[in-house]
Image: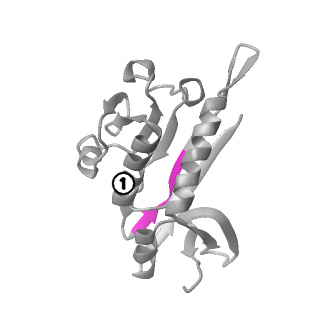
Amino acid sequence: MATKVIQLFITIDELVSLVNTLIINFELKAFVCVGETQKEIKEVSDVTCDLIEKYQATKLYLGKADVSSDDIDPGDIATAKLGLIQISLPVISDNILMISDIATKTDWYEGTIKYDNKDLVVLFKKIKSVVIKNTFSSVVAKNIVTGVEQLYPDIRFSEKAKTFYCSGGELMQVGVNNVRFKIISKGS
């Protein structure tokens, strides 16, 4: 499987701004997963914080103009076949900002035949370029039980995520309770 992922610490308002920039720059459509069960997909013309709250969304999808919400099965979202980019939305809970992912799978099988979505690879590279231009790196993960630290130069962070962290907020990956991330950058 060819999976492409960008991990980043970013606030919801910054991510909304980034998503709308991507929609305009690359002529994309946005789709939101509706409700806690995420069993419905709706196409949206403009992504806003209010819209995310209204639909209780935890994920967005971006796709080219030829994709419609009717093409997307919420129970089995075929990102590679449909050419979709999945975005897990950031959450702040108990003064902890959870990491967000921008990801896709670029290949799939039908029987024994493997297919590759080369257009999706190109789109992901373009999106990654915009993300890199609008964020910073690196972070260090610290196991709060053992004290062991590991540098992650590819995990990105936004300006507001850095402010959140520097103001006493914590950074974490969902489901990994024994690890906290620290932002490191020149001048910090």
The prevailing secondary structure element of the residues shown in magenta is strand
Q: Quadrant of the N terminus?
A: top right
- Taking 145 as reference, is 57 above or below it? above
- Which residue lies most toward the front here? 25
Q: Can you give x and y, in whole percent of width and height, for residue 149 in the image?
A: 68, 75
Residue at (26, 48) in percent of width and height: 53
Report the magenta residues as a range. Answer: 96-102
Q: Secondary structure at mark 1?
A: helix
- Which residue lies most toward the bottom here? 187
Image mark count: 1
Q: Can you give x and y, in whole percent of width and height, for residue 55 in the image?
A: 27, 40
- Taking 152 as reference, is 44 above or below it? above
In the image, residue 156 lies in the stretch drawn in magenta = no
Q: Amino acid at mark 1?
A: Ser
Crowdedness near tag 1: few (<14), some (14–19) or many (≥20) residues, C-alpha within 10 Å:
some
- Taking 184 as reference, is 46 above or below it? above
Residue 93 visible, this angle? yes
Q: How is the image coloured?
A: one colour
Viewed as shown, does residue 164 lie left or right of 78? left
